[in-house]
Image: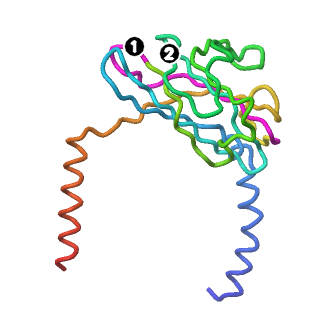
Amino acid sequence: MNLNAWRVISRASAPCALALALSPVALAQRAPTVTYTATGTPGAWDLTFTLTSHFLPGEGDFYFFGVAMDTGRNIVSSPNGWDPDKWRDWTNAGFGGSGLNYSNNWINLYSRPDDLTPNTSKSVWVARSTAAAAPTSLPFFAFAAGGTYTGTDYFDNYWNPGFEGTAHLVPVPEPASLAVLGIGLLAFRRARFKK
């Protein structure tokens, strides 16, 4: 294929790629995601939550986040500027979300603009679960503001979009597994340098 033919194909493909990127399916994929790790022992699991924004620039930043835990409210740590006591219990029912009661909530009303802007993550929300086994998934919610959200997967409104979803446990590797991995990497590196 010659260069001119490639340019014609590229120019014809660009609008299709843009249309695909802006399609309702692509727009619906930008809801925040939440993962967490669990450290501790049975009956005292510290769950460290990571909220990741998938927003586009200009769509706002996150200022309110919470999780529902069947062991109740037990906040261990909060990010700077995030108040864990403003709303000790929360439900999104009045805003178009579910009627689920979220018992562990953090809100940042005073330190805006926030530091959880488009395409960033934050991982310093910690709550303790008193369950015998660390939970493998938990319901979460998050609200954003300060922009115009163009996705289709929210409740409330485009300037204060709310999201509900499921946070998933990310297993922390055990020290023995890390040691085996380290030995394997050293062996691989040694083999590469011998060549």
SS for callout 2: loop
The residue range painted magenta reads 129-148
Residue at (65%, 42%) from the top-left corner?
Answer: 116
- Which x, y percent locates residue 31? 65, 38
Q: Residues within 10 Å of mark 1 (few under 14, many from 20)?
A: some
Q: Which mark is residue 130?
A: 1
At label 1, the amino acid type is Thr
**72 or 109, which lies in front?**
109
Q: For the C terminus, which image quadrant? A: bottom left
Q: Are marks 2 and 1 in contact (CB under 8 Å)?
A: yes
Does residue 190 appear to the left or right of 122 in the view shown? left
The residue that mark 2 highlights is 74
Give the mark, 2 or 1, whose residue is nearer the N terminus. Answer: 2
Magenta span includes 42: no
SS type, badge 1: loop
Q: Residue at x 64, y 29 (%)?
A: 82
Judge the density around disc 2: few (<14), some (14-19), many (≥20) Cα neighbours within 10 Å: some
Q: Quadrant of the N terminus?
A: bottom right
